[in-house]
Image (tube, grey):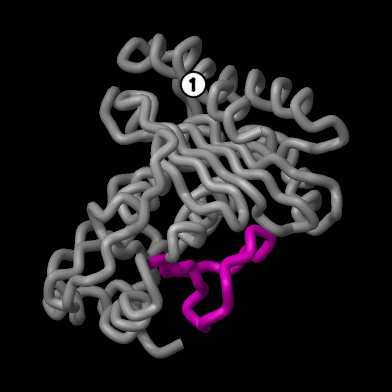
Amino acid sequence: MIEEVGALLRAVAADVVLPLFGHLGRDDVSEKAPGELVTVADRRAELILAGELLKLLPGSVVVGEEGVAAEPALLDHLHGTTPVWLVDPIDGTANYAAGREPFAVMVALLEAGVIRASWILDPISDRLLTAEAGRGTYLDGVAVRPAVDQPATALRGAVMTRFLPPAWRASVEAGAHRLGTVLPGQHCAGREYADIVTGVQQFALFWRTLPWDHAPGVMLLREAGGVARRLDGTPYDPADDRFGLLVAADERIWQTVRETLVPVV
C-alpha cells in the first residue's frame, strides 16, 4: 500500500496541484474561515484523493481538511475503530495561493486511532517521504534518520509564532539566543517535519495541532527515531485537540528545547 498511495499523491500533484500553481484566478481562492484560505486545487485534490483511498481500503473513511471544513462531525471518526485516512490535499495553502513554496500533499492512515502509515510529497521537487509502523522512514525508498549530534548552541528549528499566546511568545523571545537558530516557520507543517527527518533542522514548536497537519509528519518522525509530544510530556494523539506540540529529532533535543523556549506549564 505504501507504493500505491505514493503513486496516487504523485498523480494528484501532477494532474491538479502543479498545473494550477501560479495560475490561480481571483475566483479560485476564497476564505473558508477568517484568515484561512482554500483554493479550487485544494478541493479538487481532496476529492480525487478521497475517492481513490476509499477504493484502496474498502470500509475505511476519509477525514480531510476541506471535508471537515464543510462537515465538522467527520472528526468524530478519529475516536472510532474504523480505519481513517487523514488527508491534507495542499498543506501550506497560503504559500500555494501566493505562488510560492513550500507546500505539500499529505496523507496518514489511522487504525483504531493509531497512526499506521504516512506519506508527505513535495510536489515541486517530487520528493516523497513515507513511513510505516515498525519499518522506518524513507525518502524515495532510501532510509533516513534526523541529525542529533548538535550541541544546544548549534540547534536549528522553527517556532510557529502566529498563534502563540503572549506568555509563550515572550518565553520564546527570551530563550531563543540560547539555541543556534530559531526561525519563524515556513507556513507548511509538512516541510517542517521533512526538514527534521532529513537533518535540515532539529525541532519545531507548533501551537495549532489540526490532525491532518501533524499525523503524517509525526509518524515519519517517530519511525526515524524522533519525538513528538505535548508540552506536558504526553505523546501526540491525532484525536487530542489541545494546543501546543513540540517535535524534535531525539529525546535530548526535545528536552533541551522545552527547557529553553517553553514557559512553565
For the point 70% across and 21% down, the residue is: 52
Q: In which quarter of the image is residue 255?
A: bottom left
User: Mark 1: which secondary structure?
Assistant: helix
Q: Mark 1 points at which residue?
A: 10
Horizontally, residue 87 falls left or right of residue 155, namely right
Number of numbered callouts drawn: 1
Q: Nearer the viewer, residue 159 or 13?
A: 13
For the point 37% across and 67% down, the residue is: 248
Is 217 inside the magenta-drawn segment? no
Q: Nearer the viewer, residue 139 or 15?
A: 139
For the point 33% across and 56% down, the residue is: 196
Confirm whether residue 262 shows in the render.
no
Q: Which image quadrant: the N terminus? A: top right
**Which amino acid does the dot numbered 1 rest on?**
Arg
Magenta span: 226-248
User: Where 121 sits versus 166, above or below?
Assistant: above
**x, y (%) of residue 179?**
16, 75
Horizontally, residue 93 falls left or right of residue 133, namely left
What secondary structure prevails in the magenta region? Answer: loop
